[in-house]
Image: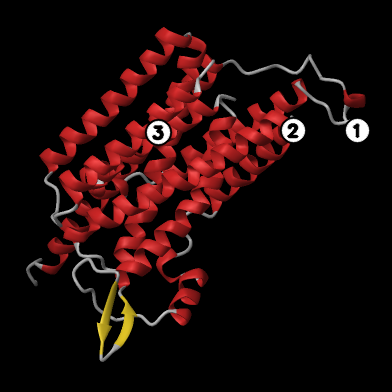
Amino acid sequence: MGVTPLIWIITIAVTIAFFVFEFFAHVRKPHEPTIGESARWSAFYIGLALLFGVGIGVVSGWTYGGEYFAGYLTEKALSIDNLFVFLIIMTGFAVPKKYQQKVLMVGIVIALIMRGAFIAVGAALIENFSWIFYIFGALLLFLAYRQAFAHGESDPANGKFMRFVRRVLPVTEEYSEDKLTVKKDGKRFVTPMLLVIIAIGFIDLVFAVDSIPAIYGLTNEAYIVFTANAFALMGLRQLYFLIGGLLERLVYLAQGLAVILAFIGVKLVFHALHVNELPFINGGEPLLWVPEIPIWFSLLFIAATVAVATIASLRKTRNDDKKKERETFDGEKVIHAPED
């Protein structure tokens, strides 16, 4: 793709500038965003991401453009899953709504930093060890199974890690505006706000393990991996407030993501066999008969899976709502039925 160090510097600088702007323009003063504000900024960031993808296609070719769009769509779907866990954490810690923006902003910045580190490590591994694709593929297949069958079974706010943090740190019971620490009777305490940020940082680490191997299954270009992740995270704060109620209705999101992760896992294993260098597999020779899944098929598959999961989720929750309404109505009829 031929990305120069100057382009990397400019890209990282612009990314940082966007997050600095976000903080001073929207997050610094605690408030709950309106639906209109969230919708406008969400549309802006999504439009910017799509425009950037078109730019990659025009400048570097549509093979890279397709890789970017497939990666962006996958990372956006995984980021929405992040939001669902963030919602659970916010609820578990009873974070006041006007301070949730700050928590989200810190969480998103932590996510970008962690993913950046994983991207650098992943690029170095892929450059020097082709067998890493086997590891990535196996990891994604395991994560797909976990995503499908173990999603939502634990509360991140009260997990083992957070119980350990509470034992180590002196914690106050109540929030002190958006402060992380507070002094009481000459002793320094941490507030629940700091615990929320620690919890979100830990979850970000877990999600980085999911997202980076997934996108490296779609492209080997570290620049595409980074920009797709950056754009997927931009606007995530606004999206949280825009679709906060919708998140609980995406009941099949976990299964949809599991299908995507499994698909990319298989794609990675196929690619690993195609470039095989392990001596105990085919004598260290590539298995050229193994098919390479083209990026256009990956993009269509991922888009179709996200669409099916979303439509099926909304249809199920709508039917469940109608069923509850009928049961409530029937119950009221029984209660108010005249006695003979």
**Residue 129 numbered mark, or none:** 2
Q: Label 3 to label 2, Cα distance in Å? A: 27 Å
Q: Which residue is the extreme one toward the bottom? A: 185
- Is residue 92 at all visible to an observer of this figure? yes
As rendered, which of 276 and 140 lies closer to the eye? Answer: 276
Q: Is residue 20 placed above or below 11 in the rendered structure?
A: below
**Residue 237 is drawn in which quadrant?**
top left
Q: Amino acid at mark 3?
A: Ile
Say which element carries label 1: loop
Q: Is residue 294 placed above or below 31 in the rendered structure?
A: above
As rendered, which of 156 and 219 lies closer to the eye? Answer: 219
Q: Residue at x 51, y 69 (%)?
A: 161
Q: Label 1 to label 3, Cα distance in Å? A: 41 Å
- Is residue 1 at all visible to an observer of this figure? no
Q: Position of residue 224 (x, y in %)?
A: 48, 25
| Mark 3, other Cα within 10 Å: few <14 / some 14–19 / many ≥20 | some
As rendered, which of 171 and 188 lies closer to the eye? Answer: 188
**Residue 214 is drawn in which quadrant?**
top right
Say which element carries label 2: loop
Residue 152 lies left or right of residue 117; in this view the side is: left
Q: Amino acid at mark 2?
A: Phe
| 3 or 2: tag closer to the N-terminus | 3
Q: Residue at x 49, y 43 (%)?
A: 115
In the rendered view of the protein, which quadrant contains the C terminus?
bottom left
Q: Amino acid at mark 1?
A: Phe
| Mark 1, other Cα within 10 Å: few <14 / some 14–19 / many ≥20 | few
Colour setting: secondary structure
Residue that numbered label 3 is attached to: 12
Residue that numbered label 1 is attached to: 280
Q: Which residue is the extreme one toward the front? A: 6
**Residue 45 is drawn in which quadrant?**
top left
